[in-house]
Image (cartoon, helix red, strand yellow):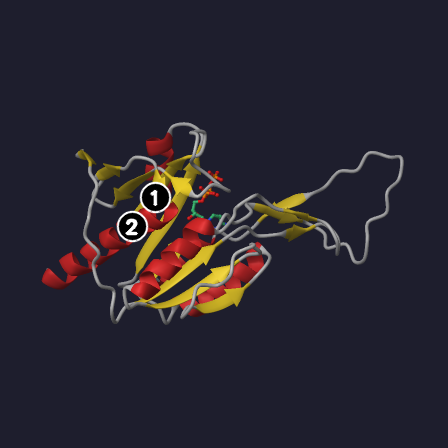
Amino acid sequence: MERVVQCLAAKASLTGKRILVTAGPTREYIDQLRFISNPSSGKMGYALAQEAQKRGAEVTLISGPTNLSPPNGVHFIGVDTAQTMYKAAAKYFKANDALIMTAAVADYTSAKQIKGKLKKGPQELSLSLVPTTDILTQVSRNKGNKLLIGFAAEVEQLLDNAKQKLKRKNLDLIIANDVSQPGVGFEVDTNAITIIDKAGQIEEYPLMSKQRAAQIILDKIAYIWEQKNAG
Ligand code: CTP
């Protein structure tokens, strides 16, 4: 297995490509006022959407609730729950050449949808959770010639866990992040990415802005398309 540490400087064009990006957290409602979520800021996904648009791609961004403004020139679809994100991703996947899943999708949602407001009482309260749909796994069933790119946020065994996800979800690339490292993770402007491809090649990059990380990821995607065309 090859392991490369490198910093690409290229800025490949994505003209003519249609790219679907998901970003941000999802909200899984307990009642009409409370939800389970995570602190995903959406910054990595928005940076990818903006950079892909600047390079000539037609970009659709499906986003959970964030504080960011949709990038100019990007088709924006706002969602909240994992289910609404799944519905939108499945719908738009058909018309796109690649799906980049940066969204921090909740793995579980409340088994019961409580109408109105859950009232407090003195007794212990248990919440029953059921798994959400795994969006990447589902859409990969209609993958065809499209590229599927996932992210793996890990706190241990970064490479092993990411490689397993790449295989399990039938991905072309997975971007692994060790979110236990300073400057990496949900709310920061920087990221340290490790890109793993289907052939098992691993590219490790130092800490950099999410904007720069987006450029490197898109260069890699453009390179895969180039190789496919050449072959
Ligand atoms: N993902 C998805 N649908 C879900 C959950 C995650 O498509 N319901 C995607 C994420 O957007 C990401 C990739 O799957 O691109 C990996 O997500 P991650 O949370 O790291 O992995 P999980 O499969 O949820 O496994 P675990 O939480 O056990 O690490």
Can residue 33 be spotted in the picture?
yes
| Secondary structure of residue under mark 1 | strand
Tell me: 195 left or right of 158: left
Real-space CA distance between mark 2 and mark 1, rounded to the nearest whole angstrom: 8 Å
Residue 74 in picture, x, y percent from top left:
42, 68
Residue located at (72% from left, 52% from top)? 112
Residue 163, by quadrant, is: top left
| Secondary structure of residue under mark 2 | helix
Image quarter where the C terminus lies is bottom left
| Three-letter residue code for mark 1 | Ile
Q: Nearer the viewer, residue 231 or 19?
A: 19
- Marks 2 and 1 close (CB-CB < 8 Å): yes
Q: Residues within 10 Å of mark 1 (few under 14, many from 20)?
A: many
Residue 136 in picture, x, y percent from top left:
42, 53
The furthest residue to the left = 230
Q: Nearer the viewer, residue 203 or 72?
A: 72
Image quarter where the N terminus lies is top left
| Three-letter residue code for mark 2 | Ile
- From the image, state whether disc 2 or disc 1 is nearer to you: 2
Residue 164, by quadrant, is: top left
Give the numbered dot on residue 175.
1
Q: Which residue is mark 2?
A: 217
Tell me: 214 left or right of 229: right
Q: Does the beta carbon of the residue at mark 1 sit less than 8 Å from ligand 1?
A: no
Residue located at (75% from left, 38% from top)? 126
Residue 96 in picture, x, y percent from top left:
35, 68
Residue located at (19% from left, 48% from top)? 9
Can residue 138 be spotted in the picture?
no
Q: Earlier in the sequence, mark 2 or mark 1?
A: 1
Tell me: 158 left or right of 11: right
